[in-house]
Image (cartoon, grey):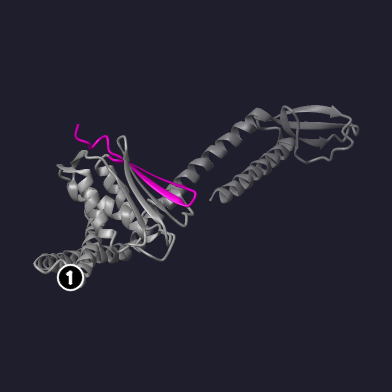
Amino acid sequence: MIFIFYQYERIEEEHLRENLFLELKNYSFFFDDTRFDIDIVSNVDKKSPYELYTDEGSLYILVPIPSAPKDMLKVYYPKTNFVKQLHTMRTNILYQFLFLTLLAFVISLVFSFYALSPLRRSLSLLETFIKDIIHDLNTPISNILINLKMMDDKNEEVESISRSTKAISMLHNNLNTYLEKTKNESEKFKLKEVINEQVAFFAPMYDYLQWEIEVDERILITDHHAFSRILYNLLSNACKYNTGKGFIRIETIGDTLHIRNSSHGIKEPSRVFERFYKESERGLGIGLHIVKALSEQLHIKTQLTVADKTVEVTLQLSEVTLN
């Protein structure tokens, strides 16, 4: 549209010049227009009559004088007046451009809403469908976990089923968190206990990793369930994307919890907390996004750094530590 109106402005300027030329020419015959004036000029051999010229103060044409072949009649129009006409013309074009741009924007907006309405309905139906599935999964998962507690927990098969069910339960909670925002409830609990609980879950599945735990006895006051999911997602990533003979180190330094693990490296560390971002085919790409979202809800500052094939995530616990 800018190009079109630029061309339109050039055409209109040419029209103004053509009209002015015709009016100057007509005036040279009848001298009946107060807008123009005349003068007699000499030494204009190189200029042709009846063509529009421009000088510092005017736009003019030259008209031959039969009785004085060496002189010509200069019929001119003040340049300041012509500039005012150009300004008025450009202002009108600008208003037309703004109006048509606004009109095009409104029409585009209406058509985009119309075109996207089936997609919005489909996404709404899909979201409702997923929510229904998540809601329906809650009951069987809970029943399995309850029944597993009544079975022999020393049996390897039962332990394996229990770990798998807990993994499905945590994935279920992650999807539920992604789709619905739940209200956080503060409660007191020991940091070491919730970390040991998560380590006890992952360590048997990743027994080839070296686990190092050095956590103090501090008490946190925040949402226990949300904090557990933060740790679950961080440790899940630390395990899944570790090396063959790697390590995971969890320690508290001051008011900061450090989770460090060996890794094959991350191509774009600045994007790891983005929703659906992942650098391999594994996972859904929402784990670390949920970590970031839950951390912000709990007022825990989260930071990820990568150096020498080592990934470190820090959680600032000063806001949730019970003094």
The image shows residue 246 at horizontal and vertical percentages of 41, 57
* Figure quadrant of residue 51: top right
Residue 60 percent coordinates (x, y): 74, 34
Which one is in front, 99 or 156? 156
- The residue closer to the viewer here, 5 or 57, is 5
Residue 277 covered by magenta stretch: no
Say whether residue 218 is left or right of residue 267.
Answer: left
**Numbered marks: total:** 1
Q: Quadrant of the C terminus?
A: top left
Outermost residue to the bottom: 157
Q: Residue at x 63, y 47 (%)?
A: 11
> Is any atom of residue 172 visible in this view?
yes
* Quadrant housing residue 302: top left
Residue assigned mark 1: 155
Mark 1 is on which residue type?
A: Asn
Q: Secondary structure at mark 1?
A: loop
Residue 121 or residue 170, whichever sits in front: 170
Residue 205: % across, % down:
30, 64
**Within the magenta stretch, is there residue 306?**
yes
- Magenta stretch bounds: 300-323
| Above or below: residue 240 compared with residue 71 | below
Q: Is residue 175 above or below residue 157?
A: above
Question: In the visual, does 213 lie left or right of 189?
Answer: right
| Residue 286 appears anywhere in the view | no
Q: Residue at the left extreme?
A: 150
Residue ID at (29%, 59%): 203
Residue 101 is situated, as x and y percent measured from the top left of the image, at 46, 48
Residue placed at 67% from the left, 39% from the top? Answer: 20
